[in-house]
Amino acid sequence: MRLHSTPAVLLLIGAATLATPPANAEEAPRQITVTGAAEVLAPPDLATITAGAQTQATTAAQALEGNSTLMTEIFAELEGLGVARADLQTSQLSLDPVWEQPADGQSTPPKIVGYQASNMVTIKLREISTLGSVIDALGGAGANRIFGVSFEVEDPRPLLDQARTQAMADARAKAELLTKAAGVTLGPVLTIHDTPAMGSLGPLRAKADMAMATPVAEGTVTLGADVEVVFGLE
């Protein structure tokens, strides 16, 4: 009789063991995660423009010589306007063949009929009010390529700090609103993650009207910050 009763007892003990929760089971942490965002507008104090010369001639040497002459005049004009050499940087220098394409219906291969030289320089202007006159002067000095006008804040750190402070306040306000609606108490900050806002450091770009006495509107630059904050719940 004992041999028949032992398996039943062992089965009951095993079932009771499986139903008992582990002694070290932990509850899920009580917390809330919110994001805060803020933007700060500021007038720009730095303008950047790209300008230069593109020349074409029968030979490569002639194309380079003509381009060099124009660029020498452009650099002299910029120096006369008070632009420092440290604020000038060559951004493109190229020499390419010019091809003559066959007429429709012809199978002759294309041939080189000349060469095109290009030299572009990026110019930083620390006096934005001079931008219009600089553009006009560049055109007068022989620059036939002018583009890429942009405006930015040279030192964005104080403005970004202001945006981060406002983003943190926005995150706390959201957390307080949500916990009040849920009927729970907001606890301390557990973690803070600072994430750069998309395009926050990029300059506000504007196209310039290339009429004489060129008018330029610099507008404002937008700098932003995002934060992700985890609060505990009491």
Image (cartoon, rainbow, N blue to C red):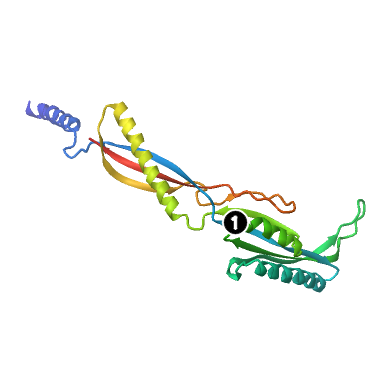
Name the residue nearer the viewer: 193 or 3: 193
Name the residue nearer the viewer: 9 or 230: 230
Drawn side of residue 209 relative to residue 128, left or right: right
* Quarter of the figure with residue 34: top left
Coordinates of residue 217 in the picture (x, y in percent): 62, 48
Coordinates of residue 200 in the picture (x, y in percent): 50, 48
Q: Which residue is drawn at 7% across and 28% down?
A: 2
Name the residue nearer the viewer: 220 or 177: 220
Q: What element carries label 1?
A: helix
Label 1, residues with CA under 10 Å away: few <14, some 14-19, many ≥20 = some
Q: Which residue is drawn at 32% across and 41% down?
A: 230
Residue of label 1: 128
**64, above or below 135, in the image:** below
**34, above or below 194, in the image:** above
* Quarter of the figure with residue 143: bottom right
Name the residue nearer the viewer: 138 or 17: 138
Coordinates of residue 1 in the picture (x, y in percent): 7, 25
**190, above or below 12, in the image:** below
Drawn side of residue 185 relative to residue 16, left or right: right
Q: Which residue is drawn at 37% across and 46% down?
A: 165
Drawn side of residue 32 relative to residue 12, left or right: right
Coordinates of residue 221 in the picture (x, y in percent): 53, 48
- In the orientation shown, which residue stands out farthest toward the left? 2
- Amino acid tagged 1: Ile
